[in-house]
Image (cartoon, grey):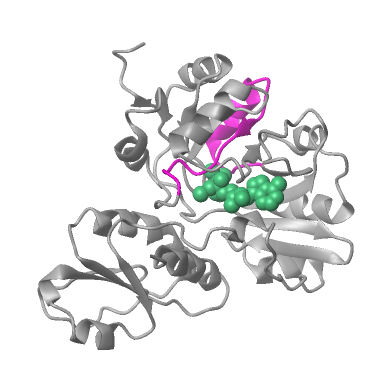
């Protein structure tokens, strides 16, 4: 095994590693995940140690069907059924009361488990072949930028994972939206690829307002998704570039190609101003700029509606020192 290339499209090989308590990086439509058997304590320990992730931060479980999701939870409310029908497979993660078979060491001792069906043909094939679901946090070191390609996973974790299953560029490029089910409605715990508006349209009622509380894991870390290069998050790029030594800075613009001095590197996330396109390009652009040896990345705020909210949340957290 040692001499085989670590990146490839071999589902059988990925399955063999996973069946032997190993971890494999897997493609999803949102970002790449670092996957292991949810029933293997050894595999879960490996995921935490490879990512250097605190044990207080629980993992998302990936399954291939609603039936398999139900095997892991005590109840599956009618609203969850409705959301599953509309958004699964897809970038929506539901937090539900867990059964005992889901170990506490996977959920940071919470009595809930976060579950989704990913919308990626290769990973769905892999999940259908396995006799267990896969826990998979994003395949990046703790607090760093999430990967949207096998190449980025290899650069960050290549010496730590046995196999990277290559499924091409992640189409959505931003993590799943996480929701919980409360007595009086549905609440977003982490904004993501499915927007508030999309959820409300299906639920036909407003979402509950998210109040920040200590135990809300997805919001637990102020700093996240961060490049090593300092990042400044602003709605006025031009003003900010103005007083900087220009050959050291790079600009990440939402849709406008700003008139900048020619030695300022600029990446435009979506020339047409389309949120989906901007989200799909976001992490790739951040990886590129972080490899560019700049002193500072100046990132422009997207309009704060729809998917723009998730984009801004990521950039804001990326800007925390
Ligand atoms: O799109 C995604 O969700 C990707 C792909 C790989 O599926 N996964 C992902 O995982 O973003 P991760 O571990 O990077 O982020 C999962 C978030 C964490 O912030 C964690 O705190 C939260 O989900 N989470 C997990 N279990 C939870 C639970 N039981 N209650 C509340 N939050 C939970
Ligand atoms: Mg993550």
Can residue 299 be seen here? The reply is: yes
Range of magenta residues:
117-142
Drawn side of residue 92 relative to residue 305, left or right: right
Which residue is drawn at the image coordinates 44% and 76% (left, top)?
302
- The x and y percentages for residue 97 are 82, 44
Is residue 171 rendered to the left or right of residue 127? Answer: left
Q: Residue furthest top?
A: 1
Residue at 51% x, 63% y: name it: 222
- The residue under the point 31% across, 53% down is 287
Above-or-below relation of 129 to 111: above
From this view, report whether residue 163 is shown above or below residue 179: above
> Residue 258 location in percent, x, y?
24, 81
Q: Total label count?
A: 0
Seen at 32% across and 12% down, the residue is 2
Splitting the image into 4 quarters, where does residue 114 fall? top right
| Observer-nearest of 74 and 116 | 74
Q: Please tell me whether residue 17 is drawn above or below residue 259 in the rendered image.
A: above
- Expressed as whole percent of the image width and height from the top left, the position of residue 107 reads 68, 40
Image quadrant in which you'd find residue 309: bottom right
- Tell me if residue 256 is in the magenta stretch: no
Position of the C terminus, as image quadrant, is bottom left
When asked about the image quadrant of residue 1, the answer is top left
């Amino acid at each position: 095994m040692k001499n085989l290339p670590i990146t490839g499209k071999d589902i059988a090989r990925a399955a063999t590693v996973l069946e032997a308590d190993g971890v494999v990086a897997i493609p999803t439509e949102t970002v790449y995940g670092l996957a292991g058997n949810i029933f293997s304590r050894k595999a879960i320990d490996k995921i935490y140690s490879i990512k250097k992730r605190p044990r207080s931060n629980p993992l998302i479980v990936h399954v291939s069907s609603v039936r398999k999701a139900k095997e892991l939870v005590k109840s599956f409310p009618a609203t969850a059924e409705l959301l599953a029908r509309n958004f699964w497979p897809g970038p929506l993660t539901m937090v539900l009361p867990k059964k005992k078979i889901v170990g506490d060491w996977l959920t940071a001792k919470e009595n809930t488990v976060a579950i989704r069906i990913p919308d990626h043909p290769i990973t769905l094939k892999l999940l259908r072949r396995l006799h267990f679901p896969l826990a998979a946090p994003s395949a990046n070191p703790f607090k760093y930028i999430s990967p949207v390609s096998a190449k980025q996973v290899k650069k960050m974790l290549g010496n730590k994972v046995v196999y990277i299953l290559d499924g091409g560029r992640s189409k959505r490029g931003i993590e799943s939206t996480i929701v919980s089910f409360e007595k009086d409605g549905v609440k977003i715990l982490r904004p993501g690829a499915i927007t508030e508006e999309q959820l409300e349209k299906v639920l036909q009622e407003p979402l509950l307002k998210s109040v920040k509380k200590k135990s809300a894991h997805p919001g637990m870390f102020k700093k996240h998704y961060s490049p090593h290069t300092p990042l400044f998050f602003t709605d006025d790029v031009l003003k900010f570039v103005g007083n900087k030594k220009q050959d050291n800075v790079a600009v990440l613009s939402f849709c406008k190609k700003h008139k900048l001095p020619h030695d300022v590197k600029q990446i435009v996330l979506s020339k047409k101003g389309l949120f989906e396109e901007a989200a799909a390009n976001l992490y790739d652009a951040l990886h590129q700029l972080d490899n560019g040896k700049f002193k500072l990345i100046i990132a422009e705020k997207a309009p704060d509606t729809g998917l723009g909210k998730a984009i801004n949340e990521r950039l804001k957290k990326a800007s925390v020192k």
